[in-house]
Amino acid sequence: MSLYGMMKTGVSGMNAQANRLSTVSDNIANSGTTGYKRASTEFSSMVVGSNSGSYNSGGVTTSVRYAISDQGLLNYTTSKSDLAIQGDGFFVVQDAGGQPYLTRAGAFVLNSEGNLVNSAGYQLMGYSYANGQPTPVANGYAGLEPVTINELGMETVPSTAGSFAGNLPANTAVGDTRSKSLSYVDKLGNRQLLDVEFTKTADNQWDVSVGGQAPVSFTFDPGTDQLTDQATYTVTLPDNQSIDIDFSMSQMGDEFTTQEGEINGSEPSTIDSIHISEDGIVSAQYENGSLRQLYRVPLASVPSPDQLRVLSGNIFAESIDSGDVRIGFAEEGGNGKVISGALEGSNVDIAEELTTMIESQRTYTANSKSFQTGSELMELLVNLKR
């Protein structure tokens, strides 16, 4: 056995425990960091060749592992743009240069450009509904773009259907007319009027014209004073807009009465709030009540998530050991679901880290003693010459 070897072994033991204490310090410092994944130090022995008459001490080496696949506790918030993943998967984000990464840190807010960015400044990526139903690319980031909210402008819902109810006077003379106006919303969001005109053409029969278009004949059953068939009038308007109006009319008495006619549609309105569903669909809720799908946020996965490269900002990048990134949607293909209004906390257990710290401190001290003993023996050996 070499005294130098003994001292080197003690040094390697102290270095190993120093590395372990470094991971413990990082874990404690980031115990409140959203999406942080606990680091741990694993030890591996280093053996030096020996013969039957002597033993050469080796040492110890360390490697760092991350518990990326361990779920942290969900902390619920009041912000709908805060996102967490319950189950497997990662959000896809990109930096200012357009480089994509993976993360579980979902504290997203709108920046000055209307992009959803997390606390580290990474932009959330999604598939846009602008070109139809999104379809993920299984391997790769093609088709993904930053989720942008503020460039949507105002939303108009043109009228497509309506209803009209009332009573036509049964005793009026043939040729008499009655009229009423209904309002609708055109494709530009303008409120317009439609004139509805009833003309009696014979006993129990009326012609109905809407918007000055060709009339449709309504026939009433004299026994019930109700329409003999379901009456629907389709109004064709400019810009290929059409409105189907369902009439619910009776024919009795001498008075022309109408209920308030209803036609759907709404005038231009701005975004009131943003909704994100469990399957990752980002929708805009407008002040007029309409809901418009904007993006679908995908979830990424890798065969071995604990082997991902860990980078600053709570982001991860694929490595040779992790396998290739696969893109899918929430609640599909083994992916978890997206929780809006929640954040995933760190998976660090403070009590466990403090226990590890005390253990490493004791072991570090013991290794220093072996180094100190080797140093004292070396000093004794040197003094033999004196």
Image (cartoon, helix red, strand yellow):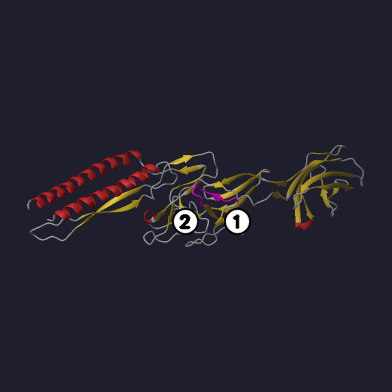
Q: What percent of the width, then of the height, locates residue 27?
A: 36, 44
Hey, what amino acid is under mark 1?
Tyr
The kind of secondary structure element at disc 2 is strand
Q: Is residue 45 visible?
A: yes
Task: Pick the residue in front: 53 or 189.
Answer: 53
Where 382 falls versus 225 (above or below)? below
Residue 160 falls left or right of residue 83 = right
Of the 4 image quadrants, the one containing the N terminus is bottom left
Q: Is residue 228 visible?
A: no
Q: CA distance from mark 1 to mark 2?
A: 22 Å
Residue 334 falls left or right of residue 254 = left
Hey, what amino acid is under mark 2?
Tyr
Residue drawn 52% across the image and 42% down it: 341
- Magenta-highlighted residues: 113-122
Q: In the picture, residue 242 is in which quadrant?
A: bottom right
Q: How many marks?
A: 2
The kind of secondary structure element at disc 1 is loop
- Judging by the rendered image, the residue that carries numbered circle 1 is 129
Q: What percent of the width, then of the height, locates residue 179?
A: 86, 44
Residue 162 falls left or right of residue 88 = right
Q: Which mark is residue 101?
A: 2
Task: Pick the residue in front: 109 or 157.
Answer: 109
Tell me the crowding category of disc 1: few under 14, some 14 to 19, or many 20 or more residues within 10 angstroms, Cα based. some
Tell me the crowding category of disc 2: few under 14, some 14 to 19, or many 20 or more residues within 10 angstroms, Cα based. many
In reply to whether residue 40 is colored magenta, the answer given is no
Identify the mark nearer the N-term, 1 or 2.
Answer: 2
Looking at this view, name the residue that lies furthest to the front.
Answer: 386
Q: Nearer the viewer, mark 1 or mark 2?
A: 2
